[in-house]
Image (tube, helix red, strand yellow):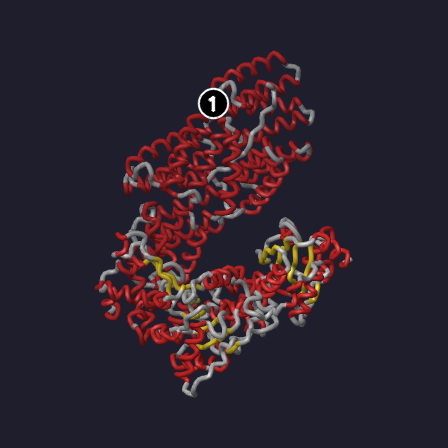
Amino acid sequence: MAGGRNAAAAARGPGIVTISYAGYNRAWAAWIAGRLERHGQQVSLQRWDGNPGDDITRMLRDLLLAEGRVLIVLSEWYFRLGPRTNEEWNTALREVVPPNSDRFAAVSVTPAALPSAVASLGAADLWGLGSAEAERRLLGRLGITPARSSSADTLGGTAGPRFPLEQPAVWGGVPRRNTRFTGREQLLGDLHNQLSTAEPGAGVATLHGLSGVGKTHIATEYVYRFGPEYDAVWWVRASERGTLREKLAGLAPALGLVTGREYGERLRAVRDALRRGDPYFRWLVVLDGADQPEDVHDLVPTGPGHVLITSQNREWAEHNSALIEVPVYSRMESVAFVRRRAPRLDDADADKLADALGDLALALDQNAGALNDSAMPVDDYIELLRHGADVESGLKVAADFQMTYYTAFSILLNRLREDRPEAVDLLRLCVFFAPGPIPVRLLRDLSIRDLPEQLTGLMDDPLLWNAAISKLAQWAVVQSDPPESEDDEATGASEILQMHRLVYQAVRADMPAAEQNMYSQVVRKILAAADPGRPTDTRLWPRYAEIVPHLESSGALRSTNPDIQLTVVNCLRYLYMSGEYRAGLRIAAAAAEQWPHLMEPGHPRLWDLVNNRANMMRAMGDFTATEALDRDAFETLRADRGDQDLLTLRAANGLAADLRNLGRYDEGLEMARFVQDGYSRLVGEQDSRTLLAKNNTAVTYRLLGRYQDALDLDGQILEARRELLRARNISTLSSENSFAHDLRLLGRYDQATSVQERNAEVHRTVLGADNPQTLRAEHNLAQCYYRGGDRQRAAALMGRLLERCERVLGGTDPQTLRVAVTYSSFEREHGDLDRARDLSEFVLAQYRGQLGDKHPFSAGALGNHGLVLRAVGERQQSQIAVEDALAAMTRAVGADHPWTLGCALNASGARNFSGDPESAAALSRDTAELAAAQLGPHHPLTLSCRIALATDLRNLRKRQEADKIEEEALAALAGTLGAQHPHTVAARSRTRPYWDFEPFSS
């Protein structure tokens, strides 16, 4: 078979060959390309790369998009993409290679075992051969007849890349290749491009980055990957000037230079030989660990070759070196590396470890090595790391770097302390902020009188401050993002500092307890000074977003300072208003562990904490827990302070919200009125707290089906909030959304849409597209479009909205479930029945699990599900569901609630379809009469009930009464909604109407 392929290739003659290779085998790919080009082939190099989620079958097929043949360079590294199992590779190879055997060829450059289906590639084995035999087998596999020049010396400087198994003529000091080397493909490519395109004498590049980030291993991989392009490679430890001079001088004998015994003379001869490119034009010198450029920069060789430097010191940029920043691993690289270092860990565990260690290569290597040698669960080990436990003694250190990353950071701190002590003072201050961005403005805004003596000079002297920042950045301890404008430069308004999380641990561990307390107090004062004091003002939310991440790390949650405690409360309020419920709940829970030990029982701040914590829990749907929390708070405060107390009323307001969410609307209304009356007496009708209480009364009216009462009260609140708070205030926008909602529920669709289009647009501008209140506003707008007959705009908005709610809030959040209910109804009528059923079943299960079978939302969701079952043809199950929904809704909210009337409308249809026209007509008549009394004779639901009644009467052959009722209802629909509205058109065509349940925000 292989011979047939070779003969076919020979018949074709010279052509195009695409070489697919793993980055680790770049030297082999380059040598193969050079050999093929000498024999007249056009060659394209294609590095085999991809992400864990990529389809390897598709990637193999993509290789065939190239013209000509595909030559795969096989090694174990080629199959580490992913990582994938051998069976996955075998499946992909069997599917792609045999049908395209004339296009694929392969060579093997490893003695390791490979997936069994590699046999389909008919690979030529090049491992362990000399260059001439390897070239003969390569050409034979591709069916290429050797050219006459093929016997030329393959080792000559002009013969292209060197054979990978043959070292350069000069090779010294190079560390062993790291067989676990992972990723860094783009960085290696950039480094090679930087050096290979440099002008003669300018080929100097510095790998710069934090200690432990992997600079030396990248340099080592560069040497092995691109070493065949050089005739001389010399590796020197360059941490000390004397060592560097001695090691460079040691290159003289290797170059064949005849010099005296004095190593200064040998050094001069080496530098001169390298400058001239004699005896070797293509040379590479690596200066590893050259952290003091001012001491050694004059020793850097020049000439036609290349110099590669590794350093923590970015000052090499001032000495004619290109600076290449080495970041921490990407998360994908971290996971792949940990899996190789500790095979017992799976992807999820590797991801957790990478997150805990900030993707720092050295820390990953040593900690993964320790985990691989122990049976400790990863979660337990990470908890030790997070609580600062001493794990250093168990770390696995490599033979070529026999110190832990803790020791490496300690050495760095000592160096900084000797060089610029104020930089260490700044570093100590920074580590009591959270890992991540630290706005410099926060540091600079604190009054000098609040600073300890050692920080006063630093903060008060811009030159000293900039020098400290520069020194930390120079040693890669911090990253400093410069100000965005010249106006910001003097104040540091937009300057950001960032540090790796392991630097935090190392610096804190280096500080005595007294100093830790002093610096953390300063940071807490900084945060309190930065608090603008108005968490409901959306314009100030960016300021709170800067403060919140640092509350825990600064010790603010343990502070007894009233100003700092107020800042914590304000941050919790901001988190609630901005929709960051999970973050807020985590901070509130942490504060709840500390504050009872710091304050007397009954302290107002403790009740502030209870209120904010309950708000967050309620927003996430934990209504039973919040009802217990709020009831306890209300009863305790009422007993201690009485009814006419602001704290008591606030607790009662939370309890009223809990009752509404639990479906206990009458109790909720009673409590809401109690709160409203109390605030009116204590702070007046126009106070924002009274308006909030009125708003909650209106919400309860809406849930009770008293839509006109809700509209009247919401209109008053909206006008008052516009006057008191202005139009773009978050509370005013909420009132406007409620007002439009009321209009829609009353059937005034055009008015509702007009109000809500503007409201949703301002929400997006003021709060952002992903704020929960914005999502509620857009949901209302989608429903306005739907009820108003604009199905196309409703569909586009509703589909996107559900995806955003799931992404931002989660699949089981109350708002997400509300959107899912309405989207299921829409899909049932206009879209995908399978999708409608999936959503309907999911929502019904969630409501039953979260709220119980007796809750109105569960009853309404069951009724909607019954309509889906009818649409898919399951009539019997549909009728059971619809009748059960009617009974449950009647028990939950009463017979005359609009929700119950809607369920009755659906039940009358089910009875009609099941052949019980008498019962259907009786139910339709009762429902129409109740709807007219509750909603008015021209409400869309009332008219739908009358259209249904006409249908049922017609089935009973009462045509005269049916025609009269239908005629009146059609005229009213045309007058209310318009002659071309979908409801009017459907009624005119005698399509039986139905009702979709819509859960309201409580």
Give x and y (percent) for residue 279.
49, 75
Depth order, front residue of 488/950 = 488
Number of marks in the rendered image: 1
Most distant residue in the bottom direction: 261
470 lies above or below 988: below
> Which part of the image, by quadrant, shows the N terminus?
bottom right
Q: Quadrant location of residue 449? A: bottom left
14 with respect to 667 (left or right): right
Query: Residue, x 53% and y 78% (percent of image)?
Result: 399
Question: Callout 1: helix, strand or loop?
Answer: loop
Depth order, front residue of 129/34 = 34
Say if residue 409 shows up in the picture.
yes
Give x and y (percent) for residue 253.
49, 82
Give x and y (percent) for residue 179.
58, 70
Per the image, the residue denoted by label 1 is: 936
Query: Residue, x 42% and y 26% (percent of image)?
Result: 751
Give x and y (percent) for residue 403.
47, 77
**Three-letter code, disc 1:** Gly
Query: Residue, x 61% and y 35% (percent of image)?
Result: 832
Depth order, front residue of 130/990 = 130
Q: Quadrant location of residue 200? A: bottom left
562 lies above or below 271: above
> Which part of the image, by quadrant, shows the C terminus?
top left
423 lies above or below 7: below
Say if residue 381 shows up in the picture.
no
Q: Residues within 10 Å of mark 1 (few under 14, many from 20)?
A: some
